[in-house]
Image: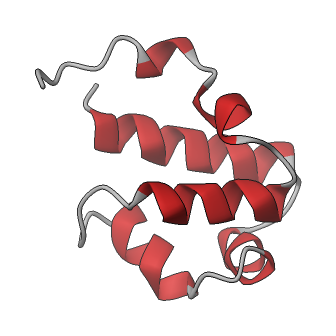
Amino acid sequence: MNIDEALRKRINELVAEKKTNLTALCLNSNITPSTIFDFMSNKSKCPKVLTIKKLCAGAGITLKEFFDRDYFNSTDEVF
């Protein structure tokens, strides 16, 4: 799994955990839905940390809670 796949997985989990949909999460996070939809459909690359932070704020979680998943520690990418 690469970092983009891990982020997509976590965003989908967040939507399910909050019992919402991606559009509502984006609007609640003050992010244009197209920003996230383009990423989720692989039309754009990894979102900025600020975008993820806004998603977290809209979902009522911290960045630490967002990234607190084992699969973020086992991505295939080399930095």
Who's the residue at 75% across and 41% down the image?
62
By what rule are the colours in the image chosen? secondary structure
Position of residue 4 relative to residue 19, above or below, is above
Q: Position of residue 79 (x, y in %)?
A: 12, 25
Q: Position of residue 65 (x, y in %)?
A: 73, 31
Q: Is residue 34 left or right of residue 52?
A: left
Q: Position of residue 47 (x, y in %)?
A: 37, 61
Q: Is residue 54 left or right of residue 36?
A: right
Position of residue 66 relative to residue 23, above or below, is above
Who's the residue at 75% across and 68% down the image?
21
> Which one is nearer the viewer's eye here, 64 or 38?
64
Q: Position of residue 37 (x, y in %)?
A: 46, 75
Who's the residue at 67% across and 30% down the image?
64
Position of residue 74 relative to residue 1, above or below, is above
> Residue 23 is drawn in which quadrant?
bottom right
> Which one is nearer the viewer's eye here, 28 or 50?
50
Which quarter of the rendering shows the N terminus? top left
Who's the residue at 52% across and 11% down the image?
70
The residue furthest left is 78
